[in-house]
Image (cartoon, rainbow, N blue to C red):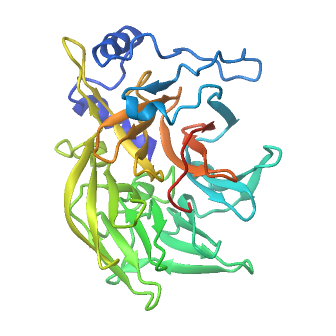
Amino acid sequence: MNPSRMNRLSASSTNGGLQIGRRSFLAAAAAVGMAGTSLLGRDYGPNAPPVRYPDPDILVLDKRFAKYKIGNTPIQRLYTGTLWGEGPAWCAGGRYLVWSDIPNNRQLRLLDDDGHVSEFRKDSGYSNGNTYDFEGRLVSCEHGNRRVVRYEHDGSVTVLADKFNGKKLNAPNDIVVHPDGGIWFSDPGYGILLNYEGHKAELELKEAVYRIDPGTKKMDKVLDEMYKPNGLCFSPDYKKLYIVDTGSTHYKEAPRNIMVYDVVDQKKLGKGTEFTSMVIKAKGSGPDQAGIADGIRADVDGNIWAGSGWVGEGYDGVHIFAPTGERIGMILLPEICSNICFGGPRRNRLFMTASQSLYAVYVETQGAHIT
């Protein structure tokens, strides 16, 4: 998602502005039972002191999350230097993580064996979301070229989608793959709203979610009822699709939520319902914390992990929701969290792309899908 467009939020937010200061946060935290648990002002620099276990920025809001928190592991900053990090995807065969630095028009790679970070692709088409398919090929959403591409094993590039009904796609954003070979992606259009993450242009299509058929290669629109559909992920059994609506960046009436839809015949979506709201309602006189989710992933137990932000201390990071939609845990970061994925040899390491950095933490669960 384009962070530059968030400046409108402070004017339209229901809490009278998204920047919540330390005192306001502590009041709100006390209202939702989090007071005293967050290590505000944490130093992630190279000379930072060790974190005392258990990590105070991994919050158990509901006992259902307690089993996923490992008591003797810290949140680590693995890299800093991006302008807007996005689209983390774990390559199991190569044992490395790929992610996008959209404004710098590049993809980066983190090697699992020694943590070395290098430039993976210099001209990435201003890529945003990335994933690997079931044949181990990287699939990317390109803002700059307004298309979805697949990088083949021989190094060639296959264009999977760039138009719908004769019109250019806006700026494909996030992407997931289905075991049947279908590719599902969102197209909210952030990449062409400014020259910062692509090339400024007018939206030619209503913001929507599409599916590319693996056999016919035909692209079908499966959803256009959201204001700006963004992050998406399947349930562990692929029978449901979760989609984030980030339309509040541009539409005052847009909800700040995650929707869930039944997947019909592996090709279509049924009627959707609200899975959860991203607003934390304060008790007493504290302000509501009205942030938004972005990239999301499911774990093997059906919990939904959501990169979140645009509020400030005590909100920005990862929010974890039970399969029934209740917020059960949080991983607090000093930056807005744009997207996440599970990786590592055991798929039990949560990688988190933030605005300028890459973070990771081990958790006692595994990602439900390839990324």
Q: Is residue 337 left or right of residue 111?
A: left
| Residue 79 in which image quadrant | top right
Q: Is residue 268 left or right of residue 252?
A: right
- Residue 225 is situated, as x and y percent measured from the top left of the image, at 20, 62
In this view, 310 is above or below 92: above
Q: Is residue 213 left or right of residue 349?
A: left
Q: Residue at x 66, y 18 (%)?
A: 51
Q: Is residue 91 left or right of residue 84?
A: right
Q: Residue at x 51, y 15 (%)?
A: 40
- Residue 284 is situated, as x and y percent measured from the top left of the image, at 18, 12
Residue at the bottom extreme?
Answer: 216
Asked if residue 315 can be seen in this view, the reply is yes
**Number of dots carrying numbers:** 0
In this view, 157 is above or below 191: below
Residue at the top extreme?
Answer: 23
Q: Residue at x 35, y 16 (%)?
A: 29
Residue at the right extreme?
Answer: 114
Q: Quadrant of the C terminus?
A: bottom right
- Residue 69 is situated, as x and y percent measured from the top left of the image, at 53, 32
178 or 224: nearer the viewer: 178
In this view, 368 is above or below 316: below
269 or 10: nearer the viewer: 269
